[in-house]
Image (cartoon, helix red, strand yellow):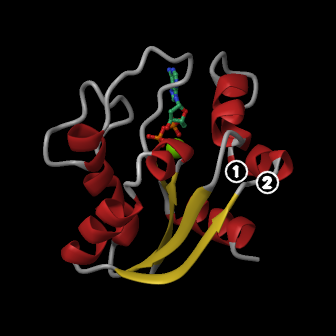
Amino acid sequence: MQTLVLCKPDAVRRNLIGEIIRRCEQKGYVVAKLAKLVPSRQLLAQHYLEHEGKPFYEPLMEFMLSGEVVAIALEGERVIEGFRALAGSTEPTLAAPGTIRGDLGRDWGTKVVQNLVHGSDSDESAARELALWFS
Ligand code: DAT
Ligand code: MG
């Protein structure tokens, strides 16, 4: 089983790629594929299809286009749920200590919340997103 993990531009800028991968590996998951790239707007539009039209959509796109991201196919039994648990809740201010967002993130007063990582939220999303990022 695999999930798509993205280290977002804030994580790359803050040199947190290693720390994020360390937490995944320490948990027991395996990095099956890894790529560093500046995503195209077209790729992001597909990736964030469900958020189109929401007030934070355009700021989210601009943020995700603002630099390199690291895309990871992370592998292991129940890794989709497992990585969401490692990442913590969407809002870094409230994300539990011990999680990636809780330990490493905060609110920077930006229009879109910058929360370091993305993780697929279901089997269907994981399959769709892995195909998009690793086609
Ligand atoms: P998650 O990344 O936890 O799956 P999501 O899919 O609901 O969260 O949203 C995608 C990203 O958009 C999220 O990581 C941060 C941003 N975001 C979500 N809801 C937001 C809101 N209400 N205000 C600002 N940014 C938001
Ligand atoms: Mg999501």
* Residue 68 x/y as whole percent: 63, 54
Q: Residue furthest right?
A: 42
Q: Are the residues at dot 2 and dot 1 in contact (C-beta closer than 8 Å)?
A: yes
- Pointer 1 local density, CA inside 10 Å: few below 14, some 14–19, many at least 20: some
Per the image, label 1 sits on a secondary structure element best described as: helix
Foreground residue among 133 and 129? 133
Q: Which mark is residue 112?
A: none
In this rendering, is residue 16 above or below 112?
below
Foreground residue among 30 and 122? 30
Snapshot quadrant of residue 48: top right
Residue drawn at x 59%, y 56% as measured from the top left? 69
Position of residue 65 in the picture relative to residue 33 (left or right)? right
**Closer to viewer: mark 2 or mark 1:** 2
**Circle 2 residue:** 43
Per the image, label 2 sits on a secondary structure element best described as: helix
Q: In the image, what residue type sits under mark 2?
A: Leu
Is ligand 2 less than 8 Å from the beta carbon at label 1?
no
Position of residue 35 in the picture relative to residue 102 (left or right)? right
* Residue 75 x/y as whole percent: 42, 80
Residue drawn at x 61%, y 73% as measured from the top left? 35
Q: In the image, what residue type sits under mark 1?
A: His
Q: Quadrant of the N terminus?
A: bottom left
- Pointer 2 local density, CA inside 10 Å: few below 14, some 14–19, many at least 20: few
* Residue 85 x/y as whole percent: 27, 54
Position of residue 13 in the picture relative to residue 22 (left or right)? right
Residue drawn at x 36%, y 28% as measured from the top left? 91
**Circle 1 residue:** 47
Foreground residue among 119 and 103? 103
